[in-house]
Amino acid sequence: MRNSIVLTSIALCAIQTISGCQERVRPVENQHGTTAMTPSPEPIGTARMLADRSIVLNLRAETEGAAGHAQLSYPVGDPMYAKILEHVGGLTPGQEKSVPPFPEQ
């Protein structure tokens, strides 16, 4: 089990490092009530909650000449489960959401 946590952490770090460079622009209201354009990071994949409430992440990363894909599964009770659920903004069984890049540590 410890090995799977280490491998999961390595996969997430690698995908985060590669995908954290891609940004898109989204409007944000500033203190003067006007709208300014600020960068918003591109999603790094999707998160889906299964009927048993486990979370499946399908992650991807692309850079010049390279692409990486990973599918990670977090059953209820996994030490990372709550952090993943919070990061994607909550999920209900059957729901799928985009996964924003994980913050750099």
Image (cartoon, helix red, strand yellow):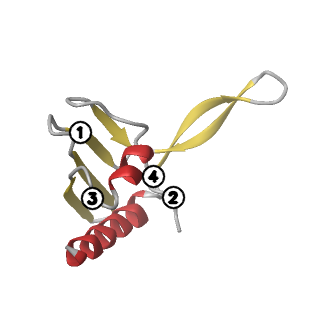
Residue type at mark 4: give it.
Gln
Q: Residue furthest front?
A: 77
Q: Which residue is mark 4?
A: 22
User: The residue tagged with tag 2: helix, strand or loop?
Assistant: loop
Mark 1 in CB contact with mark 3 (< 8 angstroms): no
Q: Which residue is mark 2?
A: 103
Q: Is residue 82 above or below residue 64?
A: above
Q: Which residue is mark 1?
A: 48
Using the numbered discs, state the Cα–Cα distance from disc 4 to disc 1 in whole angstroms.
Answer: 22 Å
Say which of 30 and 4 sits in front: 4
Residue type at mark 3: give it.
Asp
Q: Which residue is mark 3?
A: 78
Mark 4 in CB contact with mark 1 (< 8 angstroms): no
Looking at the picture, how far across and down is residue 5, in whole percent? 27, 71
Q: Badge 3 local density, few (<14 within 10 Å), some, or many (20+)?
A: few
Question: Which of the two discs, 1 and 3, labels the residue nearer the N terminus?
Answer: 1
Q: Is residue 60 above or below residue 24?
A: below
Q: Badge 2 local density, few (<14 within 10 Å), some, or many (20+)?
A: few
Using the numbered discs, state the Cα–Cα distance from disc 3 to disc 2 in whole angstroms.
Answer: 20 Å
Q: Name the mark nearer the viewer: 1 or 3.
A: 3
> What residue is rendered at 21% in x and 72% in y?
4
